[in-house]
Amino acid sequence: MITETAYNFNKDFVLYQQYSKIREDGEFLIVSSPHLELMIFNEVAKDFYLKINGKNSLKDIINLLLDEYEIEESILINDIVNLVRDFQWKGILELKEKIK
């Protein structure tokens, strides 16, 4: 329920990547945060992070991932909201309201 509420509140926000370095290595993505913390993303986290382009909203990215993966929407939303929280905490993702 909390995850669904967080999604509904943030779904129209645009996502922005924040990193000092980024490198694709096969099915993995290696990201260095602005705080120089090194993270290695699995394929799903990589697909999510690479869809963040400063234009796509959270809802847009969820819809793109639903087209790529056979997964229930509620499960994907839960997983992505938790990933967004984690990435925000680590300083590699920012949410901003869409400018109209």
Image: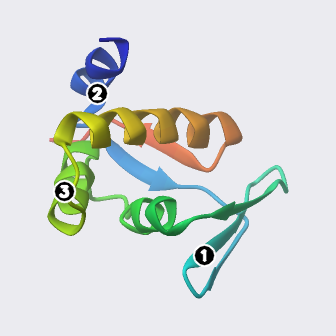
Colour option used: rainbow
Q: Quadrant of the N terminus?
A: top left
Residue 74, compared with residue 24, is above or below; it is above
Q: Secondary structure at mark 2?
A: helix
Q: Residue at x 47, y 61 (%)?
A: 49
Tell me if label 2 and label 1 are in contact, CB under 8 Å: no
| Residue 22: quarter of image | bottom right
Q: CA distance from mark 2 to mark 1?
A: 26 Å
As drawn, the label of residue 19 is none
Q: CA distance from mark 3 to mark 2?
A: 15 Å
Residue where numbered disc 1 is placed: 28
Residue where numbered disc 3 is placed: 66
The image position of residue 94, as x and y in percent, is 50, 43
Sooner in the amino-acid sequence: mark 2 or mark 1: 2
Q: Nearer the viewer, mark 3 or mark 2?
A: 3
| Residue 63: quarter of image | bottom left
Q: CA distance from mark 3 to mark 1?
A: 20 Å
Q: Nearer the viewer, mark 2 or mark 1?
A: 1
The image position of residue 6, as x and y in percent, is 34, 20
Q: Residue at x 53, y 32 (%)?
A: 85
Residue furthest bottom in the image: 26
The image position of residue 41, as x and y in percent, is 61, 63
Residue where numbered disc 2 is placed: 7
Q: Residue at x 20, y 44 (%)?
A: 59
Q: Residue at x 58, y 88 (%)?
A: 26
Instruction: Classify mark 2: residues with Cα within 10 Å, few (<14), some (14-19) or many (20+).
Output: some
Q: Secondary structure at mark 3?
A: helix
Sooner in the amino-acid sequence: mark 3 or mark 1: 1
The image position of residue 74, as x and y in percent, is 22, 33
The amino acid type of the residue labelled 1 equals Phe
The amino acid type of the residue labelled 3 equals Leu
